[in-house]
Amino acid sequence: MEAQLAVFLGFVAVALIINTAIIFLLYKAFANLSTKVTESVHEFQSNPATREWLTTMQSTTAEAAKMTTVVRDEIVGLEAALARMQTSYTASLARADARFSLIWRAIHFAADTTERLVTWPIRTIHTAVVGFQGIIDFIRGAQSSADARSRRNR
């Protein structure tokens, strides 16, 4: 049992040493990082070119904000104009549809009338010819195909 306790204490000691080393290395890394950030900020504050750049960026940002406001206002105005255009376009399409419907009816009526005027005499003549042919067939007497001969009767 003493051996197990010694092994356990050995593992605990190794884990403690590793954790201490990790914490120390993290401390050094963050200390170096903090020093570099502090130096960069100090250099940033003391450099006149950087200050000029910051002033330029601030004015550019203000101009961008103004432009965004102007564009937003223009878009709001454009939405109203688009709604008016859509209403006008819808009304124009309805008028055009009504006109095309009237034109279509007129063309259809004219074509129907022309067709009746052209075909009426033909139908009348055809009816008369069929009736006349029926009368002739009645007078002659109808022959069936069984009565038909290729030679003359004597």
Image: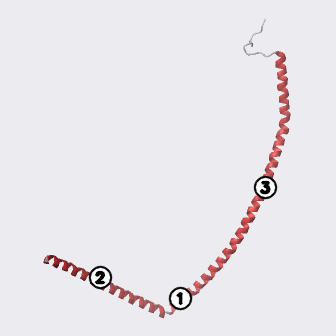
Q: Which mark is residue 54?
A: 1
CB atoms of marks 3 and 1 within 8 Å: no
| Mark whose residue sits in front, 1 or 2 | 2
Instruction: Provide the residue designation for mark 3.
Output: 98
Which of the 4 quarters of the picture holds residue 95? Answer: bottom right
* x then y, percent, for residue 93: 75, 59
Name the residue rendered at 69%, 74% in the picture: 77
Q: How far is mark 3 from mark 2, CA to CA?
A: 85 Å
Q: Quadrant of the C terminus?
A: top right
Q: Residue at x 42, y 90 (%)?
A: 38
Q: Residue furthest bottom?
A: 46
Neighbour class for label 2 at 10 Å: few (<14), some, many (≥20)? few
Question: Which circle marks residue 141 in the picture?
Answer: none
Quadrant in which the N terminus is drawn: bottom left
Q: Residue at x 83, y 18 (%)?
A: 138
Mark 1 to mark 2 CA distance (whole Å): 39 Å
Which SS class for mark 2?
helix
- Dot placed on the residue nearer the N-terminal end, 3 or 2: 2
**Vertical comparison of 36 with 148: above or below:** below
Q: How is the image coloured?
A: secondary structure
Where on the picture, by quarter, is residue 83? bottom right
How many C-alpha atoms fall within 10 Å of the one at disc 3: few (<14), some, or many (≥20)?
Answer: few
Counting from the top left corner in percent of width and height, residue 61 is at 57, 84
- In front of the other: label 3 or label 1? 3
Among the 4 quarters of the image, the one containing residue 127: top right
Residue 121 located left or right of residue 4: right
Amino acid under disc 2: Ile
Query: How far apart are labels 3 and 1 at the CA level?
Result: 65 Å
Task: Compare marks 3 and 1 and give the one earlier in the sequence.
Answer: 1
Residue sitting farthest toward the top: 154
Residue that label 2 marks: 22
Along the horizontal axis of the image, is 44 left or right of 130?
Answer: left
